[in-house]
Image (tube, rainbow, N blue to C red):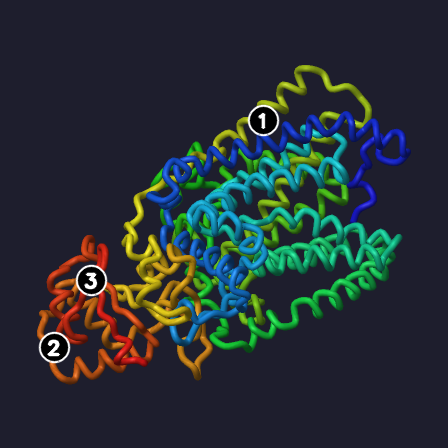
Amino acid sequence: MTEDAPRPVPDADPASGTARGVARRWPVDVCVALVFLAGAGWVTARGWLDPYGRLLGSRPDDQGFNEWMLAYAAHAVSNLENPFFTTLQNAPDGVNLVANVGLQLPGLLLSPVTLLFGAPVAYLLFITLNLAGTGYAWYHVLSRHMVDSRAAAFLGGLFCAFAPALVSHSNGHPHMTAQWLVPFIVWRVVALSRGGQVVRDGLVLGALVIAQFFVSLEILFLTALGCLMLALAYLAVRPQDAVRRGRALLLGLAITAGLVAVAAAYPLWMYFAGPQHRTGHPGTPDMYALKLGSFVRYATESVAGGPTSAVGWAPNTTEQASFYGWPLLLLVLGVLCWLRREAVVQVLGIVGLVTALFSIGTTWTVGTRRTDVPAPFALVQHLPVFDSVVVARFALITTVALGVLLAVAVDRFVSRQGRPVNRLALGAGAVAVAVALVPIMPTPLPARGRAPVPDFVTSGAWRDHVAPGRTLVPVPVTRMTSVYWGSAALAGFAVPEGYFLGPVSATDATGRWGVEPQPTAKLITAVSEGKRDTTVGPADIDQARADVRHWKADAVVLPDRGARRHDALKTVLDSLYGPGQRVDDVWLWDVRPLTG
């Protein structure tokens, strides 16, 4: 949006020059893409060693849920089912998929991989390509529209993709790392402000926004908020030019909004008013906020970090969206002082600072302690959508602002308005960048073994016992057992409970994790944990049969191996549903006579 920021690539205008520029550029672009892909492979390598036996990262439940989402997407494609709502998890009430992580577009694109190789491979491919794709997308936009130096564009893309923000979210949050459309959305907003073919540009932006809507609604919200802050910051630093550009921008955005409203009307209704919709996020905003000190610390998965480096400074290992360290912040401060007259630098500085302050939460912090003094986010915490945002994620916008700022700074440094840069200055600049960035370079994410899923499920033998759309009840009835079994079966059967965000009840839409277990699920869990003996009475039997009717179940299944207190569980299930039968590597209770 600034006059002094974007500088076209030298051969971009004449047709013959464009051909020569493209010919010279594509080998570099390919090399850059390969470097980003190698970096993404480095971060996710431990998961690729055994996709079916390992879970990548420190948040296995999040990975399990996202694998289920990809499995359901493939199921929905092959069976032409609703991609926005399903009863195949949390049977029979279902899950509002728009109010969770979405992933409709990635799920569709990855369906062939999911159907051929399973959800674990599709998930790993997704999380890997997100890092590589986001880095390359920023490199592409920066090198074509913001800076002349491809090295500067490469550095900017590298930071946006491999700073702690996206690496930490690679611990189970592919919807947060799927930012490969964001650079193009931001640039099309800037292009709209320049006038020209407003209708065409508005339609192009609309198509990009619709695509991002079906990738990650949360990232789309953060992108829209970032663009709004860019516009307001530019209005503050260049008010006359901002007003001049405003008419074309608003007209183009109106066209974009009209297109998006048509394409996203149903999923938007599903999000705000559909079955199992929710309002807000479980817990208070400050439960998921950063601390002021988190900006100068190092993340768990950074070279200078470690298992305890972020403890107390972030909500968990996925929400380490700042953690830049002192050297980088000092470098950024130096850049802001050096290039303080450039509007693009002023705008990026404002956006980065405001979003960083938002990520602190509703109150200021001193060390790891939270005070009672209101912080900026307190002003907007009750607004619609803001009340559902994980507060620490505002620092994702900060990360992008810093990445673009670094690209601009390096570009200005190597160009120096046409003056050559002496070797001493160039070396000093390289050392400063290295000192700032090397400590936050990512290390490979950890991996852990996953609980095996019975062959009865993975082989498809369940199909002889559970009709399409009916429920298989895994024992113990826990949310993640349901998710992993359903994912392994490509969502071929419904499961009770699950891992998702939903309403407290049919009359209270306040967001909560999961659902209140049925009485029989609680009974079975208590037996598996040794908190209850195997004695059951007539009331327990009546309730157990009522619960399988509620779940619309065809079978209750206990693995022959791996379940805690297996014999006690089998005894209880025999008492509740009659003698079970051995099928492959499970014990099965056919409850169709009770639920049909």
Distance of label 3 from label 2 (alpha carbons): 19 Å
Q: Earlier in the sequence, mark 1 or mark 3?
A: 1
Give residue 432's mark: 1
According to the picture, the residue beneath numbered tag 2 turns out to be 536
> Which residue is painted at 66% across and 16% down in the image?
424
Q: Which residue is mark 3?
A: 587
Q: Secondary structure at mark 3?
A: strand
Residue at (19% x, 72% y) in the render: 523
Neighbour tally class for label 3: few under 14, some 14-19, many 20 plus, Cα within 10 Å: many
Quarter occupied by residue 331: top right
> From where the camera sits, is residue 292 visible?
no
Residue 474 in the image: x percent, y percent? 28, 64
What's under tag 3, amino acid-wise? Answer: Trp
Q: Position of residue 527 (x, y in %)?
A: 15, 67
Instruction: Please provide percent x and percent y for residue 168.
Output: 46, 45
Q: CA distance from mark 1 to mark 2?
A: 70 Å
Mark 1 to mark 3: distance in Å? 63 Å
**Farthest residue, direction top:** 423
Q: What residue lies at 37% left-to-right and 65% top-to-bottom? A: 498
**Which quarter of the figure is the C terminus placed in?**
bottom left
In this rendered view, identify the residue nearer to me: 517 or 405. 517
Q: Is residue 74 above or below residue 55?
A: below
